[in-house]
Amino acid sequence: MSYFIDCTSINISYNVYGLATITYTVVSDVSGIHHYGTDSFSIGGRTFYGYIGSASVNRIPNTTWYESHVTFIGDSTGFYL
């Protein structure tokens, strides 16, 4: 079986306290949540520390592909939530 993964969308938003909410969608030919850190997430040279707030995996209809949706909540100050 081949292994393919692609991040099809990503969004980073901040609240007034500097807390970041990072949502992203991953498409893969392997089922499962695709998050490669237990308490951190790195993107664009910045590392966010926090936790996964929600996650789901759905099979894309009429295909053998899966779509994962992940929401990661954290900050980039090094203070663990």
Image: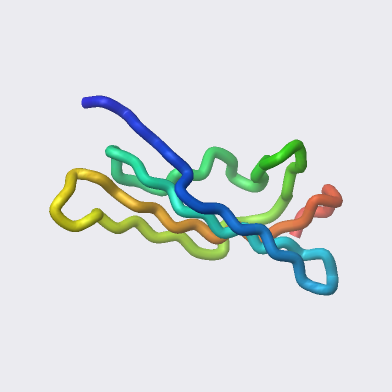
* Residue 42 x, y percent position in the rendering: 68, 41
Q: How many marks?
A: 0
Residue at the top extreme, as displayed: 2
Q: Residue at x 54, y 38 (%)?
A: 36
Q: Is residue 58 above or below residue 3?
A: below
- Horizontally, residue 67 falls left or right of residue 8, namely left
* Residue 41 x, y percent position in the rendering: 65, 45
Residue at the bottom extreme, as displayed: 16
Q: Residue at x 74, y 43 (%)?
A: 47
Q: Specify the quadrant that holds the C terminus.
A: bottom right
Pick the front one: 37 or 63: 63
Q: Residue at x 39, y 53 (%)?
A: 68
Q: Is residue 31 above or below residue 56?
A: above
Quarter of the rendering containing residue 21: bottom right
Q: Specify the quadrant that holds the N terminus.
A: top left
Residue at the front extreme, as displayed: 8
* Residue 37 x, y percent position in the rendering: 59, 41
* Residue 9 x, y percent position in the rendering: 50, 52
- Horizontally, residue 76 falls left or right of residue 2, namely right
Q: Residue at x 55, y 60 (%)?
A: 71
Q: How is the image coloured?
A: rainbow
